[in-house]
Amino acid sequence: MCHLKSLLLALSLTLSSSYETSGYGPVFEEQPVDTIYPEESLEDKIIMSCRARASPPATYKWRLNSWDIDIQDKANLHYSLMGGNLVISKPDRINHTGNYSCLATNNFGTIISREASVQFGYLDMFSTEEREAVRVKEGQGVVLLCAPPPHFPDDLTFRWMLNEFPIFIPMDKRRFVSQTTGNLYIAKVEASDSGNYSCFVSSLSIAKSVFSKFIPLVPQTERGSIRKYAADIKVKFPDTYALVGQNITLECFALGNPIPQIRWRKVDGVLPLHHENSLTGGLLHLFNVQYQDEGVYECEALNSKGKDWHKANLYVEAAPQFTEHISSSERDIGSDYTMSCITSGKPKPRVHFLKNGQMYGKHELRFTDLTSDDSGMYQCIAENRHGVIHANAELRVFVGAPTFEFNPVKQRLLGAKNGRVVIECKPKAAPRPTFSWSKGTELLFNSSRIFIWEDGSLELLNVTKSDEGRYTCFAENDRGKANSTGFLTVTDATKITLAPSNADVSVGENTRMQCAASHDSSLDITFIWSLNDHVIDFDKEKEYYQHTISHIAYSYSGPPGAPGGVRVEEVGVRSVKLLWSHGTDNHSPISKYTIQYRESKSTDDWNHAVTSPRNIEGNAEMVTVVDLLPWTEYEFRVIATNTLGPGEPSEPSIKTTTLEAAPVVAPSDVGGGGGTSRELVITWTPVQPQYYYGSNFGYIIAFKPQDTTQWHRVTISDPRASRYIHKDPSIPPATKFDVKVKAFNNEGEGPYSLTAVIYSAQDAPSEAPNIIEARTLSATEAIVWWRPLVQRTVEGYQVRYWRRSMENEAAAQRISSRENQTRLDNLKPNSHYVIEVRAFNGAGYGPASQRYEIQTKKAPPSRPPKIIGTRLNTSGTLVNVAWQHVEALANESAVESYKVLYRQEGQSTGTLYTTNKQSIDLPVHKDGDYLVEVRAQSKGGDGAVAQVRISAGGVLSAQSLSLCVLLLVALLSLTL
Ligand SMILES: *[C@@H]1O[C@H](CO)[C@@H](O)[C@H](O)[C@H]1NC(C)=O
Ligand SMILES: *[C@@H]1O[C@H](CO)[C@@H](O)[C@H](O)[C@H]1NC(C)=O
Ligand SMILES: *[C@@H]1O[C@H](CO)[C@@H](O)[C@H](O)[C@H]1NC(C)=O
């Protein structure tokens, strides 16, 4: 027992240690991103993403403002984990605003993600106070203030409307809307400017727009000629900070009569190459800003009355970037190691290191004499005020007995007679092992001809045939030892037997130079020609040189060996140039090469590559591989074939990613429509990831009302997005829109999808239906009729009803628009009900009808009739069933008559009789058992039931309520 236990223990130890070496520490595949959650969002949750590749799989934790979030906390139902993602349900501004980071941990260590903020976006309504009218003389300039309502974040765009929706004032030389203040500037007022103005504010990040009360503008006509005013700059761009690569816009606008001309210049140089002056002059766009664009910019406004100018600084800074960063590494115990990160950015980024998520040091990390404790996950973090970047790496300190598993001594070694041979010995081992060598059983020592290098390699000089034999390298450290053996064969040295001789040649003539060599028959031979020390490349220079080899001896024949030195050059979007060198042809000339590729990400097998030229001759050492996908990581290998078949493939090339390209695939199935009021819902099928073709993939959605020409464009950066809802109070309801969608990535934009025609959401019905009548049917049922609406957009009606003063318990039914009545049931007896009806459609409910009130009837009698006798007539053809009158209780409806159901046992239907009497004659059937069911009938409905059974030829038993009645029936049947 005890033995078994220790055996198991040993087994589990070896298992866990081999597990350790096969796994790896976490590597982020997805990190949280800054999120703005619209306070009015219906989503009701925020998902912060976090996913790490790790083996064994990572466990996740989250922090909010550097405090650990306790997911397990039963008192806090807001947080839950979904994989590594943090789900914040029912988010609120007070408790959930802040910076979140995710920690991924496995037994190799911990890494911490970038911090991502959660903020609550809002855009309040404009104040409802009336705006004062603005009176201004014709010819003067005017500024209409927008004064946007409280909002977050500060990413508003401003437009102005004149008189009606949704007509926006275009910007021209006379009119300007500042995207900084939102104000509308009119350089020189004209009589036609008269009207009502409203500032229309949209928040991009929360997709909401609001607009102000109208501001009346009243131009006042001057008697005589209109006065002139000197240029006066009113919109002055502030000192501005831009990041390298950004696009920025400077604003400048002047009032004046005549309308001033705006001119831009850079005070300390020339305007950047990539600038654009808006047609109206008031905007200077700078694209892809660079450090050298920093400086003082000036705008000048000029008219015939005078000029004005304004200057401000543009500062160009940059978010941090790594020019060199840490990467995962395995180092031997006891060795030295330095981790450093070199960054660029302005201001200069601060750098610090984390180990397993904990602060570990600044600048660079220098390890001397690594120990196992230094293993772990390291992160280098660089930050300035424009951003934070992380580089993550695993450091693994290797300690282990020597092993030749990955790098044994070469088994077949060749040495040339009188030459020099170096046999490498590179076991994996830490600490560094000591080395010794043997030939056969004889231990080798350093001598004039034999030398054991520091790194373990064995060098033999002036090799002779007697050096042939088995060489074994022994490596040993404090953890253990290992050895590995190879066999050295000594061959005749290659000698040139026929050297090219000098030749005099006339210009334009061909000549032939000969070279021959003797070589060991077990070896291949390669001839290299050179001209004045320059090696002739027979492929490139084949116009001038031709190369022929005649083989004299064949010893071994077979398919060719593996080509070597495969490398990739000239990486393109869909092609790469592949180069290799010939392997041995095993004495049968190589007839062709084939190229294979595989995508590094997929686990697929190797595929045949398409090349240009399509067929690769046996003497080629280069080809272009075509028909690749952009932005995809590939490996390539080369296979040589001769008459004896294809040989071994080469080692794969290093992984190479093709260049990015603009997408070419358009999203499909574009459509949409519906939604709630003032919405345009656009849907599409997202593009498959293999067609992203580049980083920063997303969608551009373009839409416009069908009768206009101006497309709206919206950009969505989520590659998996499949729907976009445009909310805009100015969208006309139930209107045809043209929509189309295209993909974009870093390299540009793809083609648009086909244009689809969809409808914007309709408005909720605007009219209320009228209730014609409502009537109670019983204690629990009522019926209600209403006059249907003629509006086309009505999809149905909702009938709400509730007991008076209990509206919070109202019940509701939805009825199709084809009906104009419905039955209400499950009402409470003897109760006062209120009913109202309204129309609805996809956009919501219309106004409610006037209310209608009804009183339900009292409940039907709760007690069943008491059956007092069943009697056959003398001929035996009729049976008379009699019962006692039922007295209604005070809260029950009075009995008006009785209902008698006469049915065969097992059937649910039969013959129904109604009678005012308290007995009934029923026909007797010849065979089968029949049931008679009697109940009182009242305005409140049918009362409780009493039952008696009639058997063929007579009465058998009653199944009424009391035992007493049963006995009575039994007695009766006895007497029969
Ligand atoms: C914030 O969290 C506290 C404690 O969980 C809770 O009592 C409070 O109601 C929350 N605030 C809001 C606005 O939900
Ligand atoms: C800058 O503007 C150009 C041209 O409109 C656009 O292609 C580019 O994507 C913009 N760059 C950024 C960083 O917004
Ligand atoms: C090896 O051979 C070279 C020339 O053949 C000679 O100069 C040299 O001394 C020899 N070295 C030894 C160690 O025999």
Image: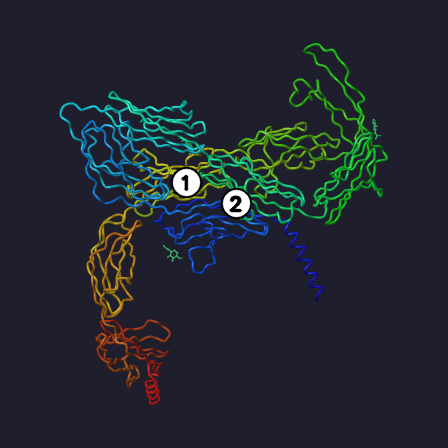
At horizontal 74% and vertical 47% (from top left) the residue drawn is 477
The answer to which quarter of the image holds residue 866 is: bottom left
Can you give x and y, in whole percent of width and height, for residue 888 in the image? Answer: 23, 78
Q: Can residue 222 be seen at all in this image of the molecule?
A: yes
* Left or right relative to 738: residue 229: left
- Considering every residue shown, the one lying at the far left of the view is 223
Asked which colour scheme the image uses, the reply is rainbow
Q: Earlier in the sequence, mark 2 or mark 1?
A: 2
Q: 595 or 923, which is in the foreground?
A: 595
Height in image: 71 above or below 792? Answer: below
- Around disc 1, counting alpha carbons within 10 Å, would you say few (fewer than 14), some (14 to 19), or many (20 or more)? some
Per the rendering, the mark at residue 716 is: 1
Q: 514 or 338, which is in the foreground?
A: 338
Which amino acid type corresponds to the residue marked 2 in the rendered image? Answer: Glu
At horizontal 70% and vertical 63% (from top left) the residue drawn is 4
The answer to which quarter of the image holds residue 832 is: bottom left
- The CA distance from mark 2 to mark 1 is 21 Å
Height in image: 280 above or below 752? Answer: above
Residue tagged 2: 29
Task: Say what secondary structure mark 2 lies in.
Answer: strand
Can you give x and y, in whole percent of width and height, for residue 865 in the image? Answer: 27, 80
